[in-house]
Image (tube, coloured by chain):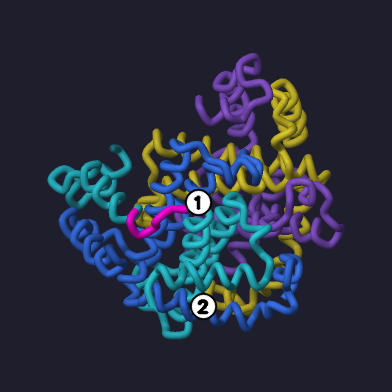
Chain colours: A blue, B cyan, C yellow, D purple
Amino acid sequence: MDMDRIVSRLRAFTSERDWDQFHSPKNLAIALSVEASELLEHFQWLTEKQSSELPPEKRDQVRDEMADVLLYLVRLADKLDLDLVDAAAKKIAKNALKYPAGRVRGSMKKYSDY
Amino acid sequence: MDMDRIVSRLRAFTSERDWDQFHSPKNLAIALSVEASELLEHFQWLTEKQSSELPPEKRDQVRDEMADVLLYLVRLADKLDLDLVDAAAKKIAKNALKYPAGRVRGSMKKYSDY
Amino acid sequence: MDMDRIVSRLRAFTSERDWDQFHSPKNLAIALSVEASELLEHFQWLTEKQSSELPPEKRDQVRDEMADVLLYLVRLADKLDLDLVDAAAKKIAKNALKYPAGRVRGSMKKYSDY
Amino acid sequence: MDMDRIVSRLRAFTSERDWDQFHSPKNLAIALSVEASELLEHFQWLTEKQSSELPPEKRDQVRDEMADVLLYLVRLADKLDLDLVDAAAKKIAKNALKYPAGRVRGSMKKYSDY
């Protein structure tokens, strides 16, 4: 399955439930942010090292939360008539100019200072 | 461009800057949540109606924030060795069982009550 | 009860559970952000008008989430040795200079533009 | 200054700018969540240890973000006619029952499992 299929399946899912009335971009942005926090919640009391060694059951829960984030992101892009993957590709190019490898290597401090 | 290209470009971007050391799943989940809030910030004082009628400049800013959310999501999936699009497809199927169209039609109240 | 009592009760609560080891400022900031999202979740599918007319049971849940936000905020202030109420008073004064009443009256657009 | 003074100063600040029209509980919950993320952003690439040793300038920025979180929390409590400090005191008592010291000592894993 590719992203286009996700877009059309989500349209059908929403339409069958008559939920489009709730899907203003504002509400979708809220929902996306709430899901991103539910994802973060799984990591909140772990050390960074522990977060790299999730037990299988926890990893499955994390995968489901990540899926929810993507679904709201896809839905919002659809409502705003944006191509998400194209936007991401362009943003990588933009970030590459903003953070020249030679200057920021090995430091996130510089990242924040830019 | 497709999602696989985004994954490999992000790997190169991170590697060139020696930033992998900062990309623990915990830190990536924080960064994703922070970006999701920056996206939400664009909508916070708008009415739902206004959020559906963004002026072009604002829409471009929103697109860039959405791209950032996707980039961190892709990066986190790569670190956890997950297939994001496959996870999203499976989650739609799961949600379809959880929220049967016949029972939740037209109501998000039922959605929360489930 | 006043804020100082909250500070000392939280210290005792944390100490009795030997949880201070988890309370790095970074982890507390994550926890605070997660609680703020749990609060937001209660409002996510409501209209603005509905959010002003919460049924009693919902209002109680909202109150508990707000309490959790305050508790993590107080705990973080304690770890950073900050006086929260004093910081808030000073921030109001700072905001009053940043957003002169005569210039921003009735508009949040100006607010974002500043 | 105490919390009651913060409440009344915020009322005056809002009224002078005619901003009450934007302060639906839903919008205030969004703003609170956005501010909590701006706070978190300061910590996102720090280790837990670094987050305990903030340089003075960074600590001042963190204090201002924490103040913003408190201000929106106070404002929301005012709109919902809630006593925030009383809610926090009651929530500590509730949490003490939920997480008995004898059972959860030294573990946040148990915390999440409850």
Q: Is residue C3 left or right of residue A41?
A: right
Front-most of residues B34 and C8: B34
Tally the marks.
Answer: 2
Residue C71 located left or right of residue B36 = right
In this rendering, does residue D95 appear at all? yes
Residue occupying the far top of the picture: D102
> Relative to residue B10, is residue C29 depicted above or below?
above
Q: Which residues are magenta?
A: B80-86
Residue sitting at 79 percent across and 51 percent down? D50
Secondary element type, mark 1: loop
Residue at image position (13%, 45%) is B102
Identity of the amino acid at label 1? Leu
Picture layout, residue D36 above or below residue D112: below
Between tags 1 and 2, which lies in front?
1
- Tell me the crowding category of disc 2: few under 14, some 14 to 19, or many 20 or more residues within 10 angstroms, Cα based: some
- Residues at discs 1 and 2 in contact (Cβ within 8 Å): no
Residue located farthest toward the left when viewing the structure as drawn: B102
Comparing D8 with D47, the one in front is D47
Q: Which mark is residue A91?
A: 2
Q: Position of residue A100 (x, y in %)?
A: 68, 80
Residue C20 at x, y percent in the picture? 74, 32
Type of amino acid under label 2: Lys
Q: Nearer the viewer, residue B100 or C102?
A: B100
Q: Nearer the viewer, residue D32 or B27?
A: B27
Q: State the residue position of label 1.
A: B80
User: Measuring 41% from the left and 68% from the top, which residue is drawn there?
Assistant: B4
Examine the image and state in which quarter residue C67 appears.
Answer: top right
Using the rendered image of the protein, determine whether residue B44 is visible from the camera's viewpoint. no
Q: Which x, y percent locates residue B37?
A: 53, 61
Label 1: chain letter: B
